[in-house]
Each structure stands twice: as structure tokens, then as C-alpha cells.
Amino acid sequence: MRHLPTPRPARDERGITTAEYAVGTAAGAGLAGLLYKLLTGGFGDRLLKTLFDHVLGLLGIG
């Protein structure tokens, strides 16, 4: 008579592991740095002015 292997308890995979947390943190910091560089330079000024002018145009004010 063969014995069936006993099932292992299911792993709880809620949350993230330490390595995933480190990669996610590094990616978030890199994205924040990139956005900071883009928005504090001339490109950011032009982008915000264009966006603001577009919104004013849609509202019929500009």
C-alpha cells in the first residue's frame, strides 16, 4: 500500500520580501530623482507653462 505525501501548508505570500522591498525602494527613489531633475530645469518650466496655458484655454480664460 502506497502512502500519499502529506500536503504542505500553503505559503502566505501577502506583502513583499526584503529583496523586493529594496528594489521597490530604489526604483521609487530613482523615479523621484528623475522627476525632480526634469521639473526643476527648463523643461519643467516649459511643461508647466504649457499645461497651465492649455487649462486656461479650455476654461475660456486664456
Image (cartoon, grey):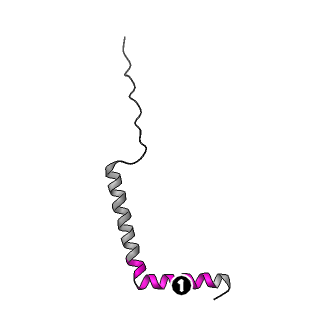
Residue range corresponding to the magenta coloring: 37-56
| Amino acid type at image mark 1 | Thr
The residue sitting at the top extreme is 1
Q: Can you identify the residue that label 1 sits on?
A: 50
Which x, y percent locates residue 18?
32, 50
The residue sitting at the right extreme is 60
Which x, y percent locates residue 58?
65, 81
Q: Is residue 53 magenta?
A: yes
In the rendered view, would you say 29 is above or below 62? above
Residue 8 lies in quadrant: top left
Residue sitting at 41 percent across and 73 percent down?
Answer: 35
Q: Is residue 55 left or right of residue 48?
A: right
Q: Label 1: how many residues lie within 10 Å, few (<14), some (14-19) or many (20+)?
A: few
In the rendered view, would you say 27 is above or below 47? above
Which x, y percent locates residue 49?
52, 85
Q: Quadrant of the N terminus?
A: top left
Residue 57 lies in quadrant: bottom right
Disc 1 secondary structure class: helix
Q: Is residue 35 magenta?
A: no
Question: What is the total number of numbered labels drawn onto the structure image?
Answer: 1
Q: Is residue 45 left or right of residue 60?
A: left
In the rendered view, would you say 53 is above or below 18? below
In the rendered view, would you say 55 is above or below 11? below
Residue sitting at 59 percent across and 83 percent down?
Answer: 54
Residue sitting at 40 percent across and 30 percent down?
Answer: 9
Instruction: Tell me the chief SS of the magenta region.
Output: helix
Q: Quadrant of the C terminus?
A: bottom right
